[in-house]
Image (cartoon, rainbow, N blue to C red):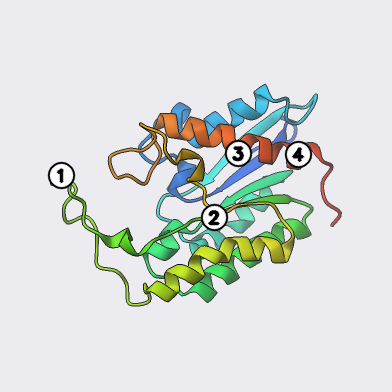
Amino acid sequence: MQQTPTLSAQQDNRVILAAYGDSLVAGWGLSTQDGLVAQLEAELVKAGAGGAKGVRVLDFGVSGDTSVDGLERLSEVLAAKPRAVLLEFGANDCYQGLPLDETRDALYKMITALRAEGVAVLLAGWRTSMDLFKPYDDPDLAGLVPLAPPLYTADYVERFNRMHAELARRLEIPCMTHILDPLDGQIGCYQADGVHPSAKGAAILAQALAPQLLPLLDEPPLPE
C-alpha cells in the first residue's frame, strides 16, 4: 500500500485533485513519473488548471482495491480537501465477483460524501466481459488467471457494465464509462498483462481525462 499523501495548506495552496482508485490510478508496474497521477498533473498544469494557484494531483490509488476497500479510505481523501476527485473503482470488484449491490452502494456513498463536502466528482467506470477469466496464451502468464467467481455470469456482466453510467446519471455527475476506452485501437498502450497501461497508455489516459477534469477544478467548490 502506498503512503497516504499529505498536504499542509500553509506549505502549498495549489488546487487539489485527488486521484482515488485502484492500480490503474496507482500506476502499477510503472515508475512514479510514468504513472497516471504524474502525467495527469502535467497535462492539467499545461492546461492552466487551478488558475493562478495552479494544481496538484494527489495519489490515492491502491493496487488491488475494490470499491468497498476504497470506501474505507474515504476519510483520508476528504482530509486532503480536494476541489475535485477522479473516482475510479470497478476492475477488482468484477474480478472478485463482488455483489453488484455492494459495489454500487460503496460508489454511491463515496460520491455523496464527497459532494456533501463541496467536492466535484468525475466517475471513471470499468467495462468487463465474459472472457475476463480466459487463460493467457503467453506461457509466462499461464496459471495466473483464477476461475470465475460464482456470481460472474452473463447477467452479472451486463448489469455491471451499466452500473457506472446509471449511477452517474442518477447523481448528475460526469462519467467516463470505461477508464481504458481512450486506449482502444492504439499500439503499445498496455503492459504484458494486457490490463495495466504502459507509460504510453498512461500518457494517453492523462490527455483524455484532463479536459474532463479541467472544468471541475476551475469551478468554485460546490455548496455544502
Indicate the quadrant where residue 48 lies: top right
Distance Cα–Cα, label 1 vs label 4 = 44 Å
**Residue drawn at x 19%, y 48% as measured from the top left:** 141
Residue 194, x across and y down, in percent? 32, 44
Q: CA distance from mark 4 to mark 2?
A: 19 Å
Mark 1 Cα-neighbour bin, 10 Å: few <14, some 14–19, many ≥20: few
Q: Is residue 66 left or right of residue 11?
A: left
Q: Amino acid at mark 3?
A: Leu
Give the mark nearest the N terminus, 4 or 2.
Answer: 2
The percent position of residue 145, horizontal first and vertical second, equals 24, 58
Which residue is painted at 21% across and 51% down in the image? 136
Q: Which residue is denoted by mark 3 in the rendering?
A: 209
Query: Helix, strand, or loop for circle 1?
Result: loop
SS at badge 3: helix
Give the residue drawn at x 44%, y 57%. Answer: 91
* Residues at circles 1 and 2 in contact by the CB criterion of under 8 Å: no
Query: Residue at label 1?
Result: 140
In this view, 57 is above or below 147: above
Disc 4 marks a residue whose amino acid type is Pro
Percent of width and height locating residue 75: 63, 57
Q: Name the mark on residue 125.
A: 2
Q: Are marks 4 and 2 in contact (CB under 8 Å)?
A: no
The amino acid type of the residue labelled 1 equals Asp
- The front one of 2 and 109 is 109
On screen, 180 above or below 40? below
Residue at the spot of label 4: 215
The answer to whether residue 165 is seen in the rendering is yes
Tag 2: residue type? Gly
In this rendered view, identify the residue nearer to me: 183 or 78. 183
